Amino acid sequence: MSGRYIDLHTHSAVSDGTDEPAELVKKAARLGLAAVALTDHDSLAGLDEAGEAARALGIDFVRGVEIAVRDDFGELHLLGLWMPEPSARMREALATLRRQREERNQAMLDALRRNGMPLTMEEVRAVSKGEALGRPHIARSLVDKGYVASRKEAFDRYIGWSGSAFVPRALVSPKEGIELLRGEGATVALAHPFLSRLMTQERLDDLLSDFRAWGLSALEAYHNAHDARHVRVCTDMAARHKLLLTGGSDYHGDNKDGIALAVGRGNMRVPHWVLSALRDQRKRQGLWV
Ligand code: AMP
Ligand code: FE
Ligand code: FE
Ligand code: ZN
């Protein structure tokens, strides 16, 4: 692959990916990517290691994070790109998000126990050294314990949104999430809008009007869950709302089957001009790049 492609959405073992941050960056460099962002859930703990690896390898690196928010329809994900060293406010907010994750993980383990599948938090922690644990880790533990045959079965029967042990996570509103990231001087993007089957063009149109007013800068058009039509809809929608585009594979290493760094399910390519446009906007806004 030529150096003209980038990947601005990836997860390391700090959250629910499986590659260590430096290892992930090394893979991106080996694939010939011009740039990669690390966007772990609710944690900035991998960014320094990834940034150092990127410097050593000569690949462009963007410090990112992904947080979830909830509106009336359900969960939406935001990406913060160009995350600085966290302010006290951001450190506290991320710690709260991780605590809410832990409470929710415990509630799901309680539900699993009631379903006759006892599993301890220690057993779940044993599958990850990270600090933002979630359902992918519980799914892995359920397989390890022999309760299910596959991670897919774990989600389908128990911890997916229609599963018997599913517990929703306490989340902030979109406005709070956008303002939190924007307050750090990050570039805020709405991630994978069409990952949810419930998303429609009409709803997205409504959301973007509000989100842009609150500080959203970009829409993730390129993503492993987006087909060519989704990319086109996002591109049109971004133009209508004067938003920039972003994109990435949402690579999770071995925790998500069939999704590769740089290419997603095989056919995704994020062109380098996407990054240039985001950078140019930041420069115009007087923000660091
Ligand atoms: P959490 O952040 O703990 O709510 O877990 C969300 C993660 O679980 C997402 O990043 C997905 O990768 C994964 N996930 C959600 N639903 C499924 C599913 N049905 N099958 C496999 N992975 C899933
Ligand atoms: Fe994830
Ligand atoms: Fe996401
Ligand atoms: Zn993600």
Image (cartoon, rainbow, N blue to C red):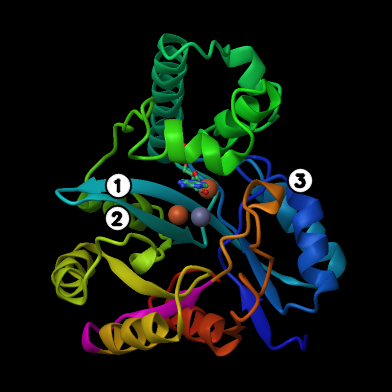
> Which three-letter amino acid code belongs to the residue tagged 2?
Ile
Q: Relative to 141, is 103 on the left or the right?
A: left
Which secondary structure lies at badge 2? helix
Identify the mark at residue 22; answer none if there is no mark: none
Q: Does 222 appear in magenta? A: no
Magenta highlight range = 240-247
Q: Nearer the viewer, residue 51 or 126?
A: 126
> Which three-letter amino acid code belongs to the residue tagged 3?
Glu
Which secondary structure lies at badge 1? strand
Answer with mark 2 or mark 3, whichever residue precedes in sequence. 3
Answer with mark 3 or mark 1, whichever residue precedes in sequence. 3
> Which three-letter amino acid code belongs to the residue tagged 1?
Val
Q: CA distance from mark 2 to mark 1?
A: 9 Å
Q: Nearer the viewer, mark 2 or mark 1?
A: 1
Contact check, label 2 and label 1, Cβ < 8 Å? yes
Q: Quadrant of the N terminus?
A: bottom right
Q: Relative to 50, is 200 on the left or the right?
A: left
Question: Can residue 176 be seen at all in this image of the molecule?
Answer: no
Q: Position of residue 260 (x, y in %)?
A: 68, 65
Q: Position of residue 36 (x, y in %)?
A: 66, 68
Q: Residue tagged by mark 3?
A: 20
Identify the mark at residue 69; answer none if there is no mark: 1
Q: Residue at x 68, y 41 (%)?
A: 13
Q: Quadrant of the C terminus?
A: bottom right
Q: Nearer the viewer, residue 107 or 89?
A: 107
Q: Residue tagged by mark 2?
A: 178
Q: CA distance from mark 3 to mark 1?
A: 26 Å
Question: Can residue 103 be seen at all in this image of the molecule?
Answer: yes
Q: Position of residue 245 (x, y in %)?
A: 42, 80
